[in-house]
Image (spheres, rainbow, N blue to C red):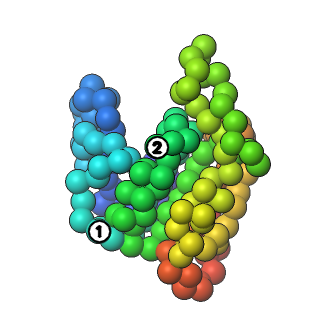
């Protein structure tokens, strides 16, 4: 696992489906996977050095997005990474034949308009060669402290 190679050993995950939590705990017992959502995380303010999403925010409806961004921002001490499908203008996309299940949007703009203290440190386009389905990763830093990040 990539995070293991970086020396990151204490990991937490939030998953709304009880069955998926059980599978994750069986497959990777060292991970602390809890039942929860992006709207109500059982952690105190600024608990994590880094909080990231990967294919999570795309499934949150426009009228509910602010609540998820606020909760993620609350539990992040310094870094937020959003790995999501991006588009310059918010657009609903059919997802496995379902409507109202996936939205592409400008995630950096969504984050920074909701939380102006966030500074974009790095933006990467991730494609199939890296195991992704053409999405964008935004590395955001709280508080605007300046420090160059070379390995993102």
Of 144 and 12, which appears nearest the observer? 144
In this picture, is 61 found above or below 2? above
Q: Residue furthest top?
A: 97
Counting from the top left corner in percent of width and height, residue 55 is at: 54, 40
Residue 141 in view in this figure:
no
**Disc 2: which residue:** 64
Q: Quadrant of residue 11?
A: bottom left
Q: Quadrant of residue 123?
A: bottom right
Q: How many marks?
A: 2
> Which residue lies at the image location 56% right of the left edge and 17% below the top edge?
98
Disc 1, SS? loop
Q: Quadrant of residue 122?
A: bottom right
**Disc 1: which residue:** 45
Q: Nearer the viewer, mark 2 or mark 1?
A: 2
Of 82 and 90, which appears nearest the observer? 90
Counting from the top left corner in percent of width and height, residue 49 is at: 39, 70
Counting from the top left corner in percent of width and height, residue 4 is at: 42, 56
Disc 2, SS? loop
């Amino acid at each position: 696992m990539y995070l293991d190679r970086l020396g990151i050993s204490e990991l937490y995950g939030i998953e709304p489906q009880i069955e998926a939590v059980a599978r994750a705990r069986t497959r990777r017992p060292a991970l602390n996977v809890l039942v929860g959502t992006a709207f109500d995380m059982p952690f105190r303010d600024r608990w994590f050095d880094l909080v990231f999403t990967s294919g999570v925010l795309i499934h949150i409806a426009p009228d509910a997005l602010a609540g998820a961004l606020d909760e993620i921002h609350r539990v992040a001490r310094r870094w937020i990474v959003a790995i999501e499908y991006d588009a310059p203008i918010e657009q609903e996309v059919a997802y496995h034949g379902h409507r109202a299940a996936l939205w592409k949007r400008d995630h950096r703009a969504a984050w920074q308009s909701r939380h102006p203290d966030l500074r974009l440190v790095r933006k990467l386009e991730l494609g199939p060669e890296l195991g992704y389905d053409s999405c964008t990763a935004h590395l955001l830093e709280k508080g605007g402290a300046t420090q160059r990040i070379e390995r993102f």
